Image (cartoon, rainbow, N blue to C red):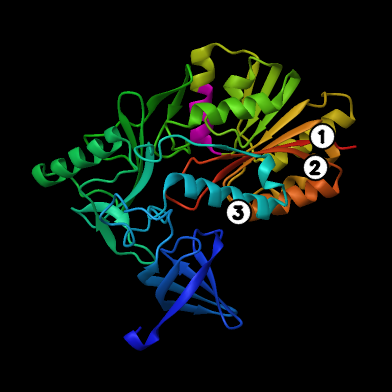
Amino acid sequence: MSDAARFTVRCGPELSFEGLGIARLGDKTIFVRGAAPDELVEVRVVARRRGFDVAEVVTVLEASPDRVEPRCEHFGVCGGCQLQHMDAAAQLSAKAAIVAHALSFPEPRIAVHAADPYRYRMRARFFSDGRRIGFRARSSHDLVEFDTCPVLTEDLEAAIHDYRRRLADLPIAAPPREFEVVAGDEACSASPALPGFMMNEVEVTVAGSRYFASGGAFFQQNRQLVPAFVDRVVEAAGSGALALDLYSGVGLFALRLAAHFDRVVGVEASESAHRLAERARALHALPSVEFRCYDVLTWLSGFVSRIASGGAKRPEAIVLDPPRAGAAELMGTLLTLAAPRIIYVSCELAALGRDLAALRRGGYRVSSVDVFDLFPQTYHVETVVLLEGPG
């Protein structure tokens, strides 16, 4: 865009779901990258869509009191962070407002949980062009190489630097163009495997419980806040004879639920995550915990049929932690099952709002909403919603 395309707008008091400032110009909405609430900014349009434009800040004319200097020299270029220009308290306030709006739940009743907004990220996806390693640039496939990344844990950052040195010094095969790394208690794991360096699996301790993680299996990334996050899910589940942990992954919730339920069944379609969960279950010697490697809908439909025939009992609690797309295909089956408590864990507000609406129509009520800032400096937010009912 040319200089003639620049213009001035005043952003409103809230951010969009994607962490963008929201301004109006005539009858058009302008979403502004790099703006804070209530700022007067000079912007230029970078994308036009039907009904709205996307712009980026050129100059801040009247800064918000919440604006801070980003710690990362690549902020605004790297695609990893969107909110380093706002202080931590302002980020939390904005996220709570977004959740309240998305879920139609009173903001004063939302509990917000946070920890240090830097040096928290123990799992990340990296990209390589053969010798360089970094992140993707914002809105492009360009590589952004970094000397330091303030959101990575120090051990994960050190592991990437160590691997860079090995690439330069050793005649080994070039790394894959894209790989994930997770930092455990004493080592790192990468997927696909990085020759001669990172282990296939690592051990991770969360609030005294020991789990196994790998670069190829999902594990929550915030080392500092995950213990409180797991505690809240377990607390919301309550106690009883049976709990189901759907999309159970490596067993993060299921192992802890075992202290409160006579029997816990975790269901996960990923074979690699299922195998890691079984290792953790065996390590803790928990015969009351069972893991099933199934498509969740297939297993749950069969379970409901067994209840109808008297071959199984209804669970007192269901923990539901689906992928970003949500669990729309499960809603009818969950309503048939009619467990007294559903604890829905989600990092995707649009899918969560859709699924909660279905459960509400079926008689469930939202009792509590907890926001966990598992992804500081980004617009992403994790929610734990307790639903009770139906009836």
- Answer few, some or many: residues within 10 Å of disc 1's Cα (few below 14, many 20 plus, some between 14 and 19): some
Q: Secondary structure at mark 2?
A: helix
Q: Quadrant of residue 214?
A: top left
Residue sitting at x 77%, y 51%: 357
Q: Which residue is disc 3 drawn over? A: 98
Q: Nearer the viewer, residue 369 or 239?
A: 369
Q: CA distance from mark 2 to mark 1?
A: 8 Å
The amino acid on which the numbered mark 3 sits, given as a three-letter code, is Ile
The amino acid on which the numbered mark 1 sits, given as a three-letter code, is Val
381 is within the stretch colored magenta: no
Query: In the image, is residue 168 above or below residue 217?
Result: below
**Residue range (magenta):** 270-278
Left or right, 239 with respect to 61, comes to right
Q: Which residue is disc 1 drawn over? A: 304
The amino acid on which the numbered mark 2 sits, given as a three-letter code, is Thr
Q: Which residue is disc 2 drawn over? A: 333
Left or right, 132 with respect to 113, comes to left
Q: Quadrant of residue 270?
A: top right
Q: Earlier in the sequence, mark 2 or mark 1?
A: 1
Residue 220 - label: none
Choose mark 3 or mark 1, whichever is in front. 3
